[in-house]
Image (cartoon, rainbow, N blue to C red):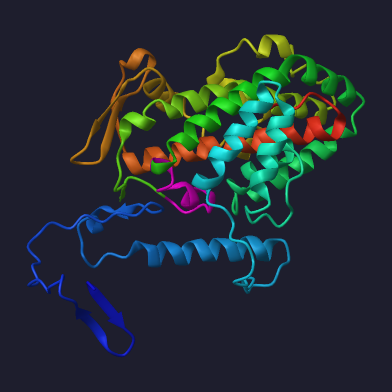
Amino acid sequence: MGILIEEKVGMSFGPNAARAARDDSGPVVNLHPSFVFPKDQISSADAFPSIELGRKLVDSMLAARARVGLPDDLPAFSADEPRRARITEEWPQLLAAWSLTRNGKFDLAQKRMEAFVGTAGYEDTPNSIQDWIFQFIGDLTRPYYERLWEGLFEQLSVAVQKDDFERFVVYYGAELSATHGRRYFEICKAYLSAFSEFSQVHQLVASDIAVDDRHVAASSNFDLTRMFYGNAFEAFGDNIEVVTAVNNLIEDRPFDRLRSITFDAYRTTDKAGRAKAFADNPPLAMVAAEFDNQLRNASHHGGMTFDRASGMVEYRAGKGGQGDVNTISYAAYLARSSRMFIQLMLIFRLEMLIANKFGARLPV
């Protein structure tokens, strides 16, 4: 026997264990897979951000429940109920099924899904690959971004009533779905393969809890994430053409006609300005709140350097990286990357809904 801990008795040591003398002289490094730390607490033995941030997470969840009219108290969970699978447990299974689907091996994909989802703790168990993907990416955006999703859904409901909507659905299925689906697949792979880094901020971002330069990430594998913001920016800048088409319909124009240019011309414009096409529609504009071309340039072109000692990322603004030097904490960089990812997942859900409900090719 080594160490035995008994209630109301305490700790006792067996023949192969001994109590060591207390030594507080060693360095303290705080680690947590789901939280970042204030700079002044990263080396503090008295730091427990999980308590403070956990409280904020609960407050965010309660606010989301109150917004849809649910009781303030959180639901009780029975020990007999299946535990919801962790992202790191579920993603490899979903990735395998999704990959099989993309390769046309639909029967194998379905079998892979059926072997897993029954024990994944879903309240509404998915019965198809597209349903599984839809629910999984929806979970990644909650609780705060659910209200942005509801805003997108309401705007789509307006667009559906327009005369040109059916032509848009045909165009979407033939011209956009396959390319968009490839981008969603690749971005999900990139983000979730690096989730050991992004998990430090993901739930905080999804709960609209600020993560900024005052915070330090305990894990800092910058090589794993340095290209992510730029790549996600590129995918988002391309795929928001769906939002632009929906906005065109809402403004009583054909889906492929903006106020001053055609949709085809719009698709050739600089990505940095594409969100301006729907900037006057608040529910749509909110989905593009995180869209920084300067950070994109630095990330996409390898123009960032990371100081591990300070936890700060340095990059130059301006075209070609010739502008002023900017800095951002690695924790804040992770948070902004997570926001970009979540925004992209909202657009993904919108496309999945359009395709599934109106019979277009699914973007998977």
Q: Closest to the observer: 213 or 359?
A: 359
Residue at 24% over, 59% down: 41
Q: Closest to the observer: 291 or 139?
A: 139
Residue at 68% over, 27% down: 101
172 displayed left or right of 213: right
Magenta residues (range)? 197-210
Q: Is residue 121 above or below residue 332?
A: below
All told, the count of numbered labels is 0
Where is residue 272? Give x, y as percent: 53, 21
Q: Residue 124 sits in which quadrant?
A: bottom right
Q: Closest to the observer: 317 or 178?
A: 178
Q: Closest to the observer: 276 or 12?
A: 12
Q: Is residue 332 above or below residue 327?
A: below
* Quarter of the picture holding the C terminus: top right
Residue at 26% over, 56% down: 30
Q: Is residue 76 above or below residue 182?
A: below
204 displayed left or right of 363: left
Where is residue 103? Give x, y as percent: 66, 20
* Quarter of the picture holding the N terminus: bottom left
289 displayed left or right of 364: left
Q: Residue 4 sits in which quadrant?
A: bottom left
